[in-house]
Image (tube, rainbow, N blue to C red):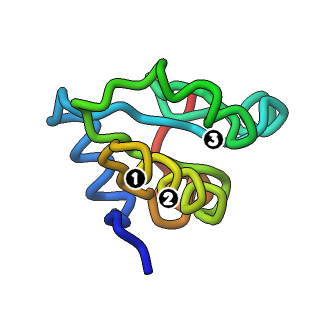
Amino acid sequence: MANFESVSVKAAQHMIKKDKNVTVLDVRTAEEVRDDGKIAKAKHIPLNELSQNLSSLNKSKKVLVYCRSGSRSVSASRMLEKNGFTPLNLSGGINAWKAEKLPVK
């Protein structure tokens, strides 16, 4: 059972544009970011490094988490939730984002 919300690409895009209280977090590997790009302004912390880097995130902000397809971001969201953050999982990950023809950097 998940204690966090999953959001659609459209909802995520709206949130990124309108809500200043959101951090976008990419938990893919460095190779994936290099090969596929990332959502503009996303903070990149690979999933395997997230637990050691939680202090670099702001607990007062919502954290919109994504990976390639939505699986690792669920794991990251669980970890964030257990540590007092308010995670939002991007359903379908960067693949869904790109399928909607949204920009990547």
Residue 26: image location, x then y, percent: 57, 38
Depth check, front residue: 52 or 76 = 52
- Cα–Cα gap, marks 3 and 1: 15 Å
**For mark 2, does the 10 Å Cα neighbourhood hold few (<14), some (14 to 19), or many (20 or more) residues?**
many
Q: Is residue 29 above or below residue 53?
A: below
Residue that badge 1 annotates:
81
Residue type at numbered disc 2: Arg
Residue 19: image location, x then y, percent: 16, 35
* Contact (Cβ within 8 Å) of mark 3 with mark 1: no
Q: Is residue 46 above or below residue 4?
A: above
Residue type at numbered disc 3: Val
Secondary-structure class at tag 1? helix
Residue 82: image location, x then y, percent: 43, 52
**Quadrant into which the C terminus falls:** top right
Q: Which mark is residue 97?
A: none
* Contact (Cβ within 8 Å) of mark 2 with mark 1: yes
- Cα–Cα gap, marks 2 and 1: 5 Å
Depth check, front residue: 80 or 13 = 80
Q: Is residue 13 above or below residue 20?
A: below
Q: Residue at horizontal 28%, vertical 40%?
A: 62
Q: Residue at horizontal 37%, vertical 66%?
A: 6
Depth check, front residue: 63 or 8 = 63
Residue that badge 3 annotates:
27
Residue that badge 2 annotates:
78
Residue type at numbered disc 1: Glu
